[in-house]
Image (tube, helix red, strand yellow):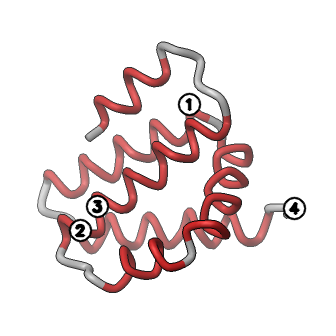
Amino acid sequence: MMAEFEAASLLSPTTAEVAAALARFHYKICTLSGNQLFPLIMNAFRGVGSILWESSARFWGEKALYEQGMHIIELIDEGRGEDAANYLNALFEHYLENVSL
């Protein structure tokens, strides 16, 4: 899953490309975890979602998103899914508190 991020980072991706990779990453995490609701919501609000994913890509930057993704995968690989979810929630809260849309 992170191979896509690694390959994309070598190509100096645009914000839109980083945002699309970020959305695919989170979609994949949700589907692999068995969460069936969030992928449906993502699909239903794809247009608005792309704006939010691009805002997130601009806010965090490619390097930070890659590091966050690697940390999420490490936590999951260690069997610490709840810690991964808590980490994601903390990132989201930080984003909401500091983003200017």
Measure how far apart labels 4 and 2 are at the Cα level: 30 Å
Q: Is 68 situated above or below 7? A: below
User: Which circle marks residue 100 in the picture?
Assistant: 4
Residue position marked by numbered label 3 in the rendering: 29
- For image coordinates 46% across by 36% down, the residue present is 66
Q: Nearer the viewer, mark 1 or mark 3?
A: 3
Sooner in the amino-acid sequence: mark 1 or mark 3: 3
> Circle 2: is it few (<14), some (14-19), or many (20+) Cα within 10 Å?
few
Name the amino acid type tagged 2: Thr
Sooner in the amino-acid sequence: mark 4 or mark 2: 2
Query: Which corner quadrant of the image does residue 34 belong to?
Result: bottom left
Measure how far apart labels 3 and 4 are at the Cα level: 26 Å
Residue position marked by numbered label 1 in the rendering: 63
Q: Is 91 situated above or below 85? A: above
Measure how far apart labels 1 and 3 are at the Cα level: 19 Å
Residue position marked by numbered label 2 in the rendering: 31
- Circles 2 and 3 in contact, beta carbons < 8 Å: yes
Name the amino acid type tagged 4: Ser
> Circle 1: is it few (<14), some (14-19), or many (20+) Cα within 10 Å?
few
Q: Tag 4's secondary structure? A: loop
Q: Tag 3's secondary structure? A: helix
